[in-house]
Image: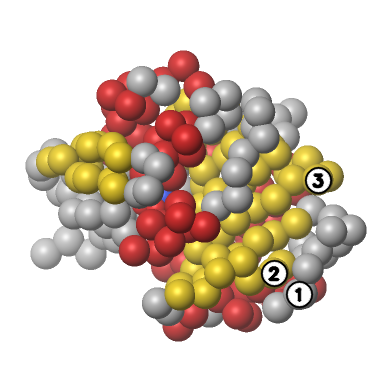
Amino acid sequence: MSDRHYFDDDPDVASSPHPVEISLPDVALTLTADRGVFSADRLDAGTKLLLLELPPFDDGARVLDIGCGWGPITCVVAARAATARIWAVDVNRRARELTAANAASTGVADRVRVATPDEVPDELVFDRIVSNPPIRIGKAALHDLLLRWLPRLTPEGTAHLVVQKHLGSDSLARWLSGQGYPTTRLASRAGYRILEVRRTDGRSRETV
Ligand SMILES: C[S@@+](CC[C@H](N)C(=O)[O-])C[C@H]1O[C@@H](n2cnc3c(N)ncnc32)[C@H](O)[C@@H]1O
């Protein structure tokens, strides 16, 4: 039995691509998922809640999807926000391939760049970060990951993260605020928190 996890790069489990439905009030898509990537059988419940709660995107928004998996966040945001340009990053090669294929089948490939984290040019900044982050990589690695990307937000930029309460959403929110990224709870439902993280504290609401 393999001891690999979903966050491994290029898991060597046999490929078995299959359709996955995304049904939201404003977007319906049939995408392709595969074994060896996160939530391969269905849209993750936390990801769905995040997609339901996301505030609208400004015209031409530069968006980063950290840990794109098979691409549900990237494809829904691109379908919903017709002028958004999205970088989808993941360490898992199969996830990147699925996201690229799903962006193509959704008709948004011209606005989506799929990349490894190291392939994102240093000078790029983002108006929005949207992520179901890889909590299971461990607290220290998760903190490193967030401190790698949050400084790439524009001064008015915001990040929206979905984190399960029992996996430490509230302590993560406090840690982010303590790092100088004021973090509020945008929504809380079914054991998930949607955290809204700001680059500056000028417009923050109640801090968690
Ligand atoms: C919880 S899953 C979310 C996947 C997808 N966005 C979704 O909502 O279904 C987290 C993803 O982060 C990826 N990941 C793990 N470590 C990463 C890292 N250091 N940088 C970028 N992505 C990473 C994993 O491969 C996985 O696809």
Dot label at residue 7: none
Q: Label 3's element? A: strand
Q: Residue at x 75, y 57 (%)?
A: 198
Disc 3 residue: CB within 8 Å of ligand 1? no
Screen quadrant of the C terminus: bottom right
Query: Which label's residue is closer to the chain start, 2 or 1?
Result: 2
Query: Which label's residue is closer to the chain start, 3 or 1?
Result: 3
Tags 2 and 1 in contact by the CB under 8 Å rule? yes
Amino acid found under the numbered disc labelled 2:
Thr
Which residue is disc 3 drawn over?
156
The correct choice, above or below, for 17 with respect to 183 in the image is: above
Q: Position of residue 33 (x, y in %)?
A: 22, 43
Amino acid found under the numbered disc labelled 3:
Glu
Q: Report, in whole angstroms, how far the alpha carbon at label 3 lies from the one at label 1.
A: 17 Å
One can see residue 138 in this view: no
Q: Residue at x 18, y 54 (%)?
A: 41
Q: Position of residue 101 (x, y in %)?
A: 29, 27
Which residue is disc 2 drawn over?
184
Q: Position of residue 89 (x, y in %)?
A: 48, 39
Q: Residue at x 52, y 43 (%)?
A: 65
Which residue is disc 1 drawn over?
207
Which picture quadrant has residue 108? top left
User: Within 10 Å of the Cα at label 3, are there few (<14), some (14-19), or many (20+) other Cα atoms?
Assistant: some
140 vs 126, left or right, is: left
